[in-house]
Structures are given as C-alpha cells and as structure tokens.
Image (tube, rainbow, N blue to C red):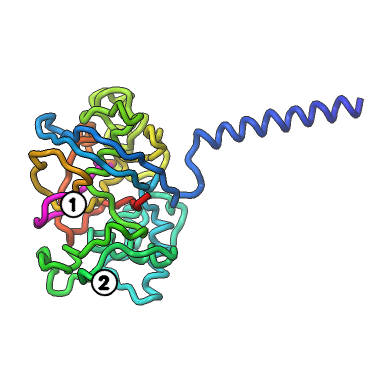
Amino acid sequence: MKRTTMSVILMFIAVFGAMADSSEVSSPASDYSALAIVPGGTYTQTDETGINSFRTTVSAFRMGKYEVTYELWNTVYQWAVANGYVFQNAGVESPGRKAGAAPTDAKYEPVEAVNWRDAIVWCNAYSRKSGLKPVYYLDPGFAALIRDSTSGAYAGRTCTAAGCYDDPYVNWNANGYRLPTEAEYQYAASYKDGSNWTPYNYASGAASGYADEPATGLVAWYHANSGRVPHDVGGKKANALGIYDMSGNMWEWCWDWYGPYPSAATVNYRGPANGSSRVMRGGCFSNYAGGMQVGERGVNLPFFLFGSVGFRVARIK
C-alpha cells in the first residue's frame, strides 16, 4: 500500500513537473535581458503604404526578446550615474510614476519617457557594465565614449556635427549593446523561416492582416485591448523568433535617420547619411490597429521626450 501510494505520488510529481516545463516553454522567461539570435538573410522591406520598398540583406545579429524593462533600465541607470554617466531623463516606470524612482510592481513594464540620446548613452553604459565593447563614440578612433545625453546648447534642435550625440561615430564591429537599425527591426519583426515573411500589413507574429482584430490582439497591446496604458513585456504571443511586443505596447527607437527608402538593393542598410529626426518602430498601446503593421514607420526628434517611446537592444552575433 505504501509502495502504491509512493508510486502515485511520484507519478503526480512527474506529470506536474512536465506540465510546469510545458508552461515555462510557452510563457515569457524571467530573464528580461535575454537576446534572440536573428539569422541573416535577404528580403523585400515594404513600408505601411505597400508602395515604398527595397531589397535588403541583413547579417545575422542578436536582438532583445523584450523591450527594455524599467527594472533593467533603472539597474543600469543607477550603475551609470555612479560611474560618471549623465542623462537628460531618468526614465519612467509607468504613466504617472516619478522619473528615476525605485522599481515597484510595474517594474516589468517597458521603460518610457527616454529620448534617443538617453538610449544610446544607456546602451554604452550597459555595454561597459556587462564587460562588452561600447558602440557609440565622439571620435572616429573610438577612444572617447559618449557618456552624456544632457541637451546643453541643443535643447531644441538636432546636433548634426559628426561625433555629436545626435550623430555619433559608431563602431559596428563592437560587441556591445546598441539600437537596432530600422532594417534589422522590420527584418526581425517579419521573419518566419528565412524563406517566408510576415507581410508588411500584419502585426509581428500575427496570422492575418492588422484589420483582423482577434489576430492582432493575440500579439499586440494596442488601442482596442490595452486600456491605453503599457503592459508588462512579454504578455502577448511572441513572433517566430521568440521576440515579444515588436508590434504594440511601446514605440521603439531605432538607429536610422528618417528618410526615403533607397532605390537600389542594400546590404546591412543603416539609413540615410544625415537627417534631423530618428526612426521609431512598432507602434504603441494607444495606436489603432493600423499602427501595428510591421511596415509602420514612426519618426521623432532625437531630443524629444514622448511618453510612449522606449527601445530594445541589439548586438552583433
């Protein structure tokens, strides 16, 4: 009897354990700093109009599975400030919360209220904190690290001088954290298997076009289901690469200057050589369904502070 009882208990533990493992596979991981490997390949990138497109080849790289959470932001931010980095904005955990405050129950929501300048300085700090080679510099020899995002004389305009924080020198071969390029972002948002791609007018990971609200709602927090507030990262279904929230929840800064698409095929396209505003991607919690398209392009000044804009990181493979 005891042996039978023990067998039942062991069987229960085995079944329960298998169920737990299965649940963990289909649920977001607890490591919100995790990166997905994005295989290289070539595809046609198309914007939300369905008209403007170009053929582009993207080398393999790594991309954050999640938007940068407030907890991760704040951890790196506190280290950075203690090590000589200076930020224009301290980041916000959730609407109405104090900028730079200690993380609370909303710590897994994406950081918001950070501008493009803040994002690249934070990436440099994150790289240094992680023992990696930073990406963004003041000089072409990659000796002077960008460590300050305060506006100074450029509070109301873009600094276009080479090496300025709005147009830094970039060591693309460094293994540190950086913003994804616009091409990398849409490539990862569209990727299925290297031969098939999510169409430009679908949300990332969706099985149907953006106007199909049930399909869009499975993968994205947006106007119809968000309550017009951000949500914890990873709460919706991931795309084929296991990356979450590439449509909805929060607009995300990308590297590129905003401008027309190129007319010829490209390799590792990194946007126009100059400009005044930087690209945002992904749409946010307050956008309507059309803003969830993987082809949707957003734009903003690099010094502009907008409550529903965050970012995710990328690295070379």
Residue in front for this viewpoint, 113 or 38: 38
Q: What element carries label 1?
A: strand
Local crowd size for mark 1, using a 10 Å CA cut-off: few (<14), some (14–19), many (≥20): many
Provide residue 84's location: percent of width, then percent of height.
35, 77
Q: Which mark is residue 256?
A: 1
- Residue type indicated by callout 1: Asp
Circles 1 and 2: CB atoms closer than 8 Å: no
Residue 187 located within the stretch drawn in magenta: no
Q: Is mark 2 on a helix, strand or loop?
A: loop
Q: Which mark is residue 23?
A: none
> Is 297 rendered above or below residue 255?
above
Tally the numbered discs: 2
Provide residue 129's location: percent of width, then percent of height.
42, 66
Local crowd size for mark 2, using a 10 Å CA cut-off: few (<14), some (14–19), many (≥20): some
How many angstroms separate mark 1 from mark 2 (CA)? 20 Å
Provide residue 190's location: percent of width, then percent of height.
28, 33
- Residue type indicated by callout 2: Asp
Q: As drawn, is 71 to the left or to the right of 49?
A: right
Q: Can residue 232 be seen in this view?
A: no
x 23%, y 33%: residue: 43
Q: Which residue lies furthest to the right in this view?
A: 1
Secondary structure that dominates the magenta span? loop
x 23%, y 32%: residue: 289
Q: Give the range drawn in magenta.
A: 270-284
x 36%, y 48%: residue: 67
Residue 278 located within the stretch drawn in magenta: yes
x 79%, y 30%: residue: 9
First of labels 1, 2 by sequence position: 2
Q: In which quarter of the image is residue 303?
A: bottom left
Provide residue 246's location: percent of width, then percent of height.
31, 40
Disc 2 marks which residue?
Answer: 148
